[in-house]
Image (cartoon, helix red, strand yellow):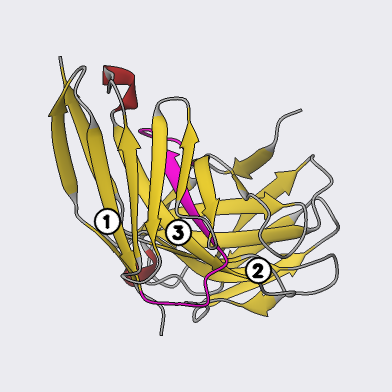
Amino acid sequence: GEDVEQSLFLSVREGDSSVINCTYTDSSSTYLYWYKQEPGAGLQLLTYIFSNMDMKQDQRLTVLLNKKDKHLSLRIADTQTGDSAIYFCAESRNNNAGNMLTFGGGTRLMVKP
Amino acid sequence: NAGVTQTPKFQVLKTGQSMTLQCAQDMNHNSMYWYRQDPGMGLRLIYYSASEGTTDKGEVPNGYNVSRLNKREFSLRLESAAPSQTSVYFCASSVQGGVYEQYFGPGTRLTVT
């Protein structure tokens, strides 16, 4: 079956690094995603990683994938108050009928000045 | 280019009433999706449409119907609303099936009393 799990809450100080973790169960996942949701808004894609990669860096964002342990993490360097939001990880399987995403429950990141 | 738009933004219904949530995208995307978001549960897929003229059930389709009116528009109908359908509903679209990025609308907050 499919199950994506995240911790509910993370609090950090401005300027520190944030690490948001995610575990998934479907070993056939082809892509894994991180989405950001700001208050009152829809989800916006932050970054993604293909399942045959173990790391991807994009400016302040670093994604690490441990396929053996089915563990995905998102590191945000130099966290700013504008990074306060809910972060969702999601996994996708290659399905010709559509891009079937399974989302985690979301981690609320609070950045204190 | 408005992206994905949803109407209404807010709605309150009484148990047993019906309503249709509207979604439109102007990105010429082939695939469209309806999700519901409940606290701590991430987003769950209700229905999706891989291409114009096709619709398929997602994870939680009971109590809902959909119509892919044309390539731009994908509506979600609640025939007889129940309090368990109180949620935030998001529409999304992607270029096509597979692993392409999904673009989300701003959401509709529905309360059923």
The answer to whether the residue labelled 1 contacts the one labelled 2, judged by CB atoms less than 8 Å apart, is: no
Residue labelled with disc 1? B39
**Residue A100 among magenta residues:** no
Q: Callout 2: 10 Å neighbours few (<14), some, many (20+)?
A: many
Residue labelled with disc 3? A90
- x, y percent for residue B63: 50, 78
| Chain under numbered label 1 | B
Which region of the structure is painted magenta?
A: A25-43
- x, y percent for residue A4: 35, 67
Check if mark 2 and mark 3 are on a common chain.
no
Q: Callout 1: 10 Å neighbours few (<14), some, many (20+)?
A: few
User: Against A1, is A63 above or below?
Assistant: above
Task: Look at label 2 and name its amino acid.
Answer: Tyr
Residue projecting furthest to the top: A113
How many angstroms separate mark 1 from mark 2 (CA)?
22 Å
Q: Which of label 2 and label 3 is nearer to you?
A: 3
Residue labelled with disc 2? B48
